[in-house]
Amino acid sequence: SPYEGDILHAPPLLLLLLYPIEGSSGTRLLRALFWTMIQVLVAVIMRMVVVEYERSPEVSKDCCHLGLALGDEDEEDDIPKLIEEENKKHQVQLDAAWINELVPLAYMLHPYSILTCIGTSTISVDHLFVMASVLCALRGRTIQTSVAISTATYISPYYIVLLPPLALLLRRKQEGAFSSYFSFVGACCAVMGALMYTSYAIMGSWDFVNAVYYFTFTVPDLSPNVGLFWYFFIEIFDQFRNFFLFLFQYHMLVYPIPLAMRVSHRPLFLFAFSLGYIAIFKSYPSIGDAAFYMPLLIIFHRQLIEMRNLFILVQILLFVTVLSPIFWHLWIVTGAGNSNFYYGLTLAYSAAQVLIISESMLAVSLRMNTSHA
């Protein structure tokens, strides 16, 4: 069994998909081409998501609120106002054009995305299915959305918190709200069950459950990473481990429903926000998680102009990105530092992300309150 020992923690179907590439038969060039294609495909789907969103009524309301839409029909049709309205209409078209290209470019050229591609991280496969799910949800395709998000959750169970925003996106395309919710959740359960049974049929046992999911939630491997778990659970007393493990892991389930009620009118923003706290609080995060949700926030530039400390937060991320490999080298290679050096940077990295997503939520809420007023 490939799950003997403590080396492999990927589900069986992902293992079968990647074995021809990452196995002994795969060459370095083949690996580089494969992971580059995955990144490009994610960027292409991301652009399609932006195009679908820019066509939605939600964007039209935002443009009206910001004074970028056409004037009211009751206004006088004098020449200056007609010229002003044409200029506003042209501005809306330019706004949609540059945002369609900026978001995928921001993802492709993000330093964390480049490092993820170089490191051949399997997180790119997760992102592919996640982006496919939101694209299908924007188009109102329940079955395809269920298959995509269930596959992403099969690979990484944290993506289950994306179900509420996807359900809200699907509701916009369907008339029956409650029936669409139940059909979506039921389809997700059916697909997930099929994936698990197929994995069992291939492996002949349930060993992969312990190696993949039990490993993810119990966090036995405390190797240093960019997350919050490893240092804390090294220092915690054993008698308190289960209590704090419960708090760290399952507090993520507290957010989806209240947030869905608060920003139900902006399900795509809720989707990006959820990806943000997944990137922060998952047990084994990757820098690729941060590179995935940050470009999606650019879609909401009309609301995020209210963010006050964005420049400072970006500088903190740059600071952490530059110093992390240096402190790692001082700690692991030369022995001149200790774990506190590196963990201090991971705390700054996580704190900056917390402030980014919290300020983005505050900006969207302020914009919503202003529009209602």
Image (cartoon, helix red, strand yellow):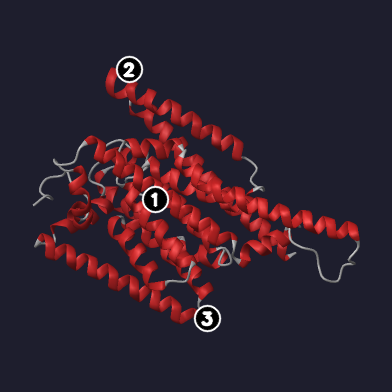
Which residue corresponds to the image point at 59% horizontal and 35% vertical from the top-left?
Answer: 312
Is 258 placed above or below 28 here?
below
Task: Determine whether the residue tagged by mark 1 lies in a helix, strand or loop.
Answer: helix
Q: Nearer the viewer, mark 1 or mark 2?
A: 1
Disc 2 vs disc 3: Cβ atoms closer than 8 Å? no
Number of the label disc, if any, that sits on residue 336:
2
Is 9 placed above or below 351 here?
below
Which residue corresponds to the image point at 21% horizontal and 55% vertical from the top-left?
Answer: 11
Q: Which label's residue is closer to the chain start, 1 or 2?
A: 1
Q: In the image, is 242 to the left or to the right of 263?
A: left
The residue indicated by pointer 3 is 175
Q: In the image, is 160 to the left or to the right of 97?
A: left
Q: In the image, is 95 to the left or to the right of 180?
A: right
Decide which of 253, 73 is in the foreground and name it: 73
Disc 1 vs disc 2: Cβ atoms closer than 8 Å? no
> CA gap, disc 2 to disc 3?
63 Å
Is 316 placed above or below 131 here?
above
Please give the count of numbered marks on the rendered protein.
Answer: 3
Q: Nearer the viewer, mark 1 or mark 3?
A: 1
Asked whether residue 333 appears in the rendered view, the answer is yes
- Image coordinates for residue 301, horizontal then vertical, percent: 62, 50
Q: In the image, is 315 to the left or to the right of 210?
A: right
Residue type, label 2: Ala
> CA gap, disc 1 to disc 2?
43 Å
The residue indicated by pointer 1 is 41
Which residue corresponds to the image point at 49% horizontal and 34% vertical from the top-left?
Answer: 317
Q: Which label's residue is closer to the chain start, 1 or 3?
A: 1
Asked whether residue 236 appears in the rendered view, the answer is no
